[in-house]
Amino acid sequence: MQAEAINYIRFGILSPDDIKKLSVAKLTVPDTYNEDGYPIDGGLLDQRLGVIDPGLVCKTCGARAKTCPGHFGHIELVRPVIHSEFSKVLYAILKATCFECHRILLDPKQVQALTESENPEAVADADEEHAQRKSKRAQVKSGKRCPYCKAVQPKLKFSQPTYFNIGDRRLKPDEIRDMVAKVSRDDLALLGIDPSISDPSWLVLSSLLVPPVNVRPSITLESGERSEDDLTHKLVDIMRINQRLEQNINAGAPQIIIDDLWELLQYHVTAYFNNETSGIPPARHRSGRALKTLAQRLKGKEGRFRYNLSGKRVNYSARTVISVDPYVDINEVGVPLAIAEKLTVPFYVTQWNIEKAKEFLTSATYPTIINIISHDGKRKRVIDGNREELIKEVAPGYIIERQLMDGDIVLFNRQPTLHRISIMAHKVKVLPGRTFRINYCTTSPYNADFDGDEMNLHVPQTLEAQAEARLLMDVQFQIFSPRDGGAIIANSEDGIMGMYALTKDGMHLTKDEASYLLGIAGIYEMPEHSKNGTYSGKDIFSMLLPKDINFEIKTSYGPIKIKNGRLMEGVITKEAYGKGNLLFERIVTDYGFDRLREFIFSSSKLADAYATLSGVTVGVKEYAIDNELEQKRVKIIHETFAKVTEFIEQYKSKKLEPFIGYTLRESLERMIIAELNIARNNAGETLVKHESSNNSAVEMARSGSRGNVLNLEQMSMFLGQQATLSGGRIKRGYYTNRVLPHIPPNDIAPVSRGFVTTSFYSGMHPVELFMHAVGSRGSEVYKALLTGRSGYLYRRLSNALQDYYVRKDLSVRDVNNNIIQTIYGGDAMNPMRSRFAKEVK
Amino acid sequence: MSDKDDNDIVPQHALMQAKDAKEVLSEMHLRPENLPKIFSTDPQAAKLGAKPGDIIKIKRHDYGNTYDIYRLVTEE
């Protein structure tokens, strides 16, 4: 479908005539219902304005509540009031024109200069035009005497929201209206105003448009009491004051009383347009809550635009808590039966599937048909009463809405939806229970865990949408990151540990164990190679791999060699099997996404089963150190401190050789930091070397399942240097150049600047604990600030890029067919495929 | 200004014949104003003597790829 091109949109102001034309009723009674609960004629819920009660008929169009579009009415104000949202425009006009002859305060020369500078072609876009007008107004401002009638201009004082004063005298709205009405068309044009569509005198209101009742429906409470909309309340206020003002005028009341009521009328009208106008107290409900008037309905996050138009609620969706199920495939989602019974998928009846359609219709229990849509688009609910009849009626061309079933494609989403992989297509697997079930390998793209997280599910309703979801959004196509092409859907934690333990050198399993594990993975044959009736863990892992795969990689644990589908050498760690691994890329290049998905699923089941079988226990004992290691720890610290002391001595005697480009003091600091870093690395190495493979904490770090050497070291050896945000050592504190009073002034020894020599296991001294707290607080604050800032940055970026697309010729274009990039990224590479495909066409 | 003044990384710019330009535009389904722009006062455009409305072809080499991009000459 090709959209019609819009040439222009013109905004103007409603004239009093426009209001009379729009209005179907002049409202005179400042009330809503009479004693019988019937809308009063001429009241604010006059039946000519439309009806909202079912059964009543609109007196204007004759339609009932559902079909009547509503009609505007109007209130005639006995005294005019200024439209508060436009008071600044009135001020600009008054300031720029003479108070006597109402001509613009510019001499003919200046006018000519202005007209000549106005080159229509130079006014390229609206922004520029706006800027031009602004500058024009500014130029007009100065001028003490009218260049035409020579009248001296009095000083006009404007105060928010609607007050105009000359000296002590307040200008009444009708005076202002008369003044601006006398400004000539040509002079208004110089101010950028076209009086044919927005005459400034219309900014002073003599009649007020009243929106239809549909816009401000009243609600009936359970007690039978009626509760009116905020807008209706405000309109009642306006009409009451209007009536009182009229009575007082007719009774010939003193001018002061009339002026006070007039001002009150002005206040109510101002509040009706915008209850947050600066300079007026907000009108309040009896409960003390500020009324939501016209501007409040539109403005801000909860306003009409951002809440109802940019963001909408949708049908065919479900939300519940998520939980794990390792037996749900990575591209599946477990859906509770209760949800599957509510959600529907359209089933297009044809001559070839009509039998199936009838079969669905016949069933009274799941899976059955919820609605049936006939040729004329009428939707009927299927109930037991009309089932027989509908089975006879159904014909090719009908659409029947059947309940969600296994294999249906759905979109699954977790908020915040920060990137494309926060919404992926899954296949439905209907399960008992009340939660959505997902495979834990898919938690990372969603950033989900199971501590109460909820996720949303959407059912695509057209065949096109279903095909698109399946081909573009299926989980298996999102395994590789769009950032760098590394695997982001992969096994983690226990799964890594299980695979590591299984494939360790010398790991042999009995036939019983081996067949149990393989059975869980869905493999029903035994490995070719066996030794004395036992099977090696490596051979069991090999059964999961494609039969003829060849793969070699060097990991920090040692080289891994896979030949002809058999793991010949090496232990599977996170580097080979976890996030960012290269094995997946080999599998996908040679065997495709389906095979990779199958590998991830079956291997995760096997790894879990083995981890469960072997078990891993971690306790405090893993972090306790023996005497020998304690001595090594003390030795490392002593040696380091000795070196640092030596540097300081050299510095004091000016013997220290500075680094190029650094002062002597800076060089000293760098040398100390470098030395402390060496100490930390040294301690880590010593620790890992000392601990045997009986230490499961070390094993976890080695396999990559959880924790790293630094964590271990901080628990067993020492915490090391606590850093500040700027990356240097902690130094801020007292003016005597020390962090705490417990430290000698000007001391730059490691312990005085945040080096912690104790471990989490041994506990910290008070000064060390303080240093640690400084570091922790720093990183916590940094994290909070960073998420906020990067979130907003991302929002702006995605809004700016949202409708750019890559065309078939690999150029990036916007909706107006402008070229953004002649070739996508300069190389036409798709980062999600870039690790294993050269160019994606 | 001569070619010698150009740095190695300045890609080669060439003024297109009207006929060739038309062909390229129709091939890419573009109107001239959809193209990226280049000022007529741009050193490379000025060297070619390009006038507003002309189209300049630039031979770019990024990441080992060589490809052409086209720019519409505009007035500054």
Image: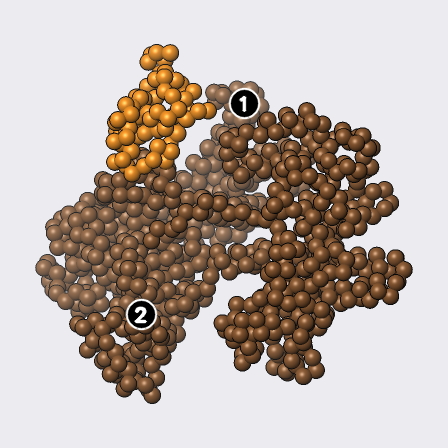
Residue at 33 percent of width and 46 percent of height:
A482
- The three-letter amino acid code for the residue at tag 2 is Val
Q: How crowded is the residue under tag 2: few (<14 C-alpha within 10 Å), some, or many (20+)?
A: many
**Amino acid type of the residue tagged 1 in the rendering:** Leu
Chain in brown, by letter, is A
* Residue A596 seen by the camera: yes
Q: Are marks 2 and 1 on the same chain?
A: yes
Q: Residue at x 65, y 80 (%)?
A: A38
Residue A809 position in % (x across, y down): 26, 40
Rendered-image quadrant of the C terminus of chain A:
top left
Colour scheme used in the picture?
by chain
Marked residue nearer the N-terminal end (2 or 1): 2
| Displayed quadrant of residue A622 | bottom left
| Chain identifier of the residue bearing label 1 in the image | A
Q: In the image, which disc is placed on residue A520?
A: none
Camera-side mark, 2 or 1? 2
Q: Give me the chain that's orange.
A: B
Q: Which residue is mark 2?
A: A345
